[in-house]
Image: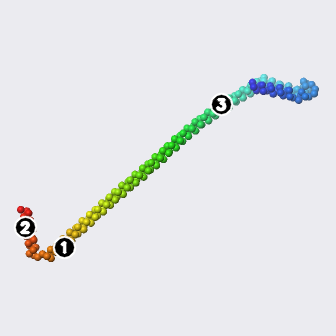
Amino acid sequence: MRFTQITLTGATASLTASPAFAASGPFISLGNTDFVVILGFIAFIGILFYFKVPAMIGGMLDQRAVGIQSEIDEARTLREEAQTLLASYERKQQEVQAQADRIVAGAKDEANAAAAQAREDLAESIDRRMAAAEDQIASAEASAVKEVRDQSVTIAIAVARDVIAKQMTAASGNSLIDDAIAQVDAKLH
């Protein structure tokens, strides 16, 4: 309907502003080309209205407007879905980042705990080795002392034998043997 009004207004303006009104001579004559052009233009407009071309053009424009509006609505819907999806991915990214931070913090804590445990284990190992070394030293010391005592006893016995052998005569040896037999006899009876 609106297109029809614009077309009629344009036709009226073109008729009133034509140079035919400025020309001399009869305007309404088939010899006047301006008049013939105006008649052809009016016939053309009439044919357009008879075949309802303005209504068809208006309908096509309305359909096109509806199509554009539906595309705009679809684009708006897609944009909202994209924004929702983007927000979802951003939330997931933040959650993953937070989880990664927690994992890193946990790994650091575990590494610190493992290092502390390793220090404790090393200290205990050093203490055990020191105790074992001290035990070995004490054992070696005791063994050395025993060996020195054994050698001292062996040397003392050898020296005592030599001293007794030099100082003892046959008579004193017999008297010692007799005394020893008497002591044994007294102890046994």
Instruction: Sort mark 1 into few (<14), some (14-19) or many (20+) by Cα contacts within 10 Å.
Output: few
Q: Position of residue 109 (x, y in %)?
A: 45, 48
Tell whether label 3 touches label 2 (CB within 8 Å): no
Instruction: Sort mark 2 into few (<14), some (14-19) or many (20+) by Cα contacts within 10 Å.
Output: few
* Residue 77: quadrant of the picture: top right
In the depicted structure, whether residue 83 falls above or below residue 134: above
Q: Quadrant of the N terminus?
A: top right
The residue shown at (23%, 67%) is: 149
* Residue 172: quadrant of the picture: bottom left
Check disc 1 and report the residue beneath it: 159
Spatial separation of the CA atoms under disc 2 and disc 3: 141 Å
* Residue 168: quadrant of the picture: bottom left
Q: In the orientation shown, which residue stands out farthest toward the top?
A: 50
SS category of the residue bearing label 3: helix
SS category of the residue bearing label 1: helix
Check disc 2 and report the residue beneath it: 182
The residue shown at (93%, 26%) is: 25
In the depicted structure, whether residue 123 falls above or below residue 53: below
Looking at marks 3 and 1 on the same chain, the residue that comes earlier in the sequence is marked by: 3
Q: Does the rendering let one see residue 33?
A: no
The residue shown at (7%, 62%) is: 188
Q: Position of residue 98 (x, y in %)?
A: 51, 43
Check disc 3 and report the residue beneath it: 70
Left or right side of 94 for 160: left
